[in-house]
Amino acid sequence: MAHTKVNINIKNRKAYFEYELIEKLIAGIQLTGTEIKSVRNGKVSLNDAYCQFHAGELFAKNIHISEYELGTCNNHPAKRDRKLLLTKREIQKWERKIKESGLTIVPTRLFIQERGLAKLEIALARGKKLYDKRESLKQKDSSREMDRMRKF
């Protein structure tokens, strides 16, 4: 089967604003046939997504992958839990870090690599306080202002 070169790179902008990202990791994601087709069409939202451990495995929850338009009765539910494919060592390391401190795991981006496999970039994150969010907005505004000045 010939793969057309489709550059899918869906980011979770909300995660960058709401959380301070500490460590990142790339995980495979277990998808069904109609899900990967919807991902290739870019019909994905990571806005309210998070990851949770269950029975020694890591699952991505609340990732919204729209139903495939050409799918039949075999279509997938839009917001099902999807298993992340990581090594046992990586899972144990991150599970330990979450139990020790008040960290969480959030998906930051979903992309398709060269071989046509869907990958999910996840990050170990700490929630930002309100004043941190204000500081992020100030930095963003000032950098935008500097870019405007450079153009003139």
Image (spheres, rainbow, N blue to C red):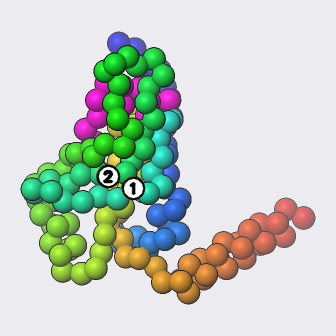
What residue would you read off at disc 1? 49
Which residue occupies the extreme front position in the image?
73
User: Real-space Cα distance between discs 1 and 2?
Assistant: 6 Å
Amino acid under disc 2: Lys
Is residue 119 a member of the stretch shown in magenta? Answer: no
In the shown orientation, is residue 23 left or right of residue 66?
left
Q: Are marks 1 and 2 in contact (CB under 8 Å)?
A: yes
Q: Residue at x 14, y 53 (%)?
A: 57
Q: Position of residue 150 (x, y in %)?
A: 82, 67
Is residue 38 a member of the stretch shown in magenta? Answer: yes
Q: Quadrant of residue 107?
A: bottom left
* Residue 3 numbered tag: none
User: Which range is magenta?
Assistant: 25-41
In the shown orientation, is residue 19 left or right of residue 144?
left
On the rendered image, what quadrant is the C terminus found in?
bottom right
Residue 129 or residue 69, whichever sits in front: 69
Q: Residue at x 45, y 35 (%)?
A: 66
Residue 34 or residue 132, whichever sits in front: 34
What residue would you read off at disc 2? 61
Q: Secondary structure at mark 2?
A: strand
Q: Secondary structure at mark 1?
A: loop
**Nearer-N-terminus badge (1/2):** 1
